Amino acid sequence: MYLTVDGGGSKLAAACFTEDFTVVARGRSGGVNTTQNRPESVREHVEECLEQVLRGVEAIDEALVVFVGPRDLFAQALQNHVRVGRITFFDESHAALMAGSGREEGLLALSGTGSDVFYIRPGETMRVGGWGPVLGDQGSGTWIGLQAARAAVRELNEWGEKTLLTPLILRHFGAEADSWNIVRRVYGQNAPFPEMARLTPLCAQAAREGDEVALRIFSEAGRLMGVQMNTLLGGLKDVSPRDVTLCGGAWKAHERMLEAFEEELHRLRPDMRVHRPWFEHMAAGPMHLLRKQGYSPIEARRRVAQAFEMEIISREEWT
């Protein structure tokens, strides 16, 4: 029996599967990244997810874990629930590349709750970005939501342009009758940044309805991700990769973001190709097992897709 886990800023997801790649149980709860979640919330989310996925399970041969949070906390909680033969932790970037392309080497543009870009190869990772929501994370879901909230506040203060974001955000915060409820909701909690990330779907809704303010936010998010990737590429001395794998939920919000990313990337590197990821991060564990067994990326992808259909993002095949 195996356990595969994906924990980040907005969610913790897990699945138990057998050696023939049959999924027998799943669990899901809230985020575990302590830059965006209170420590006590992280502990609660871990317990909630493990109780779901391990119900009736007595032993796990190997846990394959992506956990952007306190790893010791997760390991201890898991061992309190079941007997565990081995726990293998993956860095988020390596897991995203494996789940997204089946490869151990390549470029990755991550935009989820946070954001950064990577060049990854065995034994080495180069990164630009990833400074968290206060110092950086430009182009992330949190950044997008924050820009949307600020645009709404500018309109409410009558020095910003009219935008569909304003009524959507007022409704989200229950502030239609009293706009100051936005302040109470945002600052009345210890971890306000997850609340900003939850505004990204509202920004996407406004953009789909043609709102120029929302569309500009997604354009700028994509451009900033492209700036970071071009910066990373400028620092690579001994390799010249041509493919970029995307990962993270912010890329799914609106196509304008990807268009702007490719435009900025191709301004300096017109030869670069951008690919949507094959799977969510939770498929990194199963993909890793199959690649260790000698399966090619395409063969491993087909096998994982049969068992983890819920994690499929793209059916694109590339070489």
Image: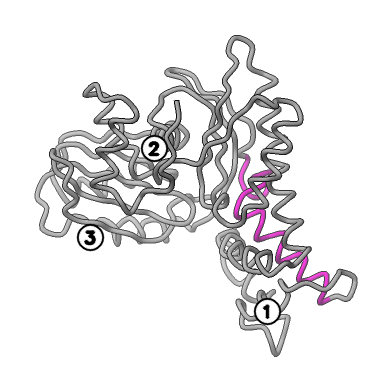
Residue lying farthest right? 159
Which residue is labeled 1 in the image? 170
- 108 or 129: nearer the viewer: 108
Which residue is labeled 2 in the image? 99
How far separated are the C-alphas under marks 3 and 1?
A: 36 Å
Mark positioned earlier in the residue sequence (3 or 2)? 3
- Where is residue 319 drawn, in percent x and y? 45, 25
Which residue is labeled 3 in the image? 51
- 92 or 110: nearer the viewer: 110
**Label 1: element kind:** helix
Report the amino acid beneath label 1: Leu
Which of pointers 2 and 1 indicates the residue nearer the eye?
2
- Report the side of 60 relative to 256 (left or right): left
Q: At 67% across and 52% down in the image, what residue appears?
A: 256
Binning the other alpha carbons within 10 Å of mark 2 as few (below 14), some (14 to 19) or many (20 upward) gives: many
How far separated are the C-alphas under marks 2 and 1?
A: 37 Å
- Count every numbered label the image shows and give the total: 3
Identify the magenta region: 131-156
**Label 2: element kind:** helix
Report the amino acid beneath label 2: Ala
Q: Does 155 appear above or below 2?
A: below
Q: At 58% across and 57% down in the image, what residue appears?
A: 253
Which of pointers 3 and 2 indicates the residue nearer the eye?
2
Q: Is residue 129 magenta?
A: no
- 270 or 191: nearer the viewer: 270
- Where is residue 45 drawn, in percent x and y? 36, 59
- Which image quarter is the N terminus in? top left
Report the amino acid beneath label 3: Glu
Q: At 59% across and 43% down in the image, what residue appears?
A: 115
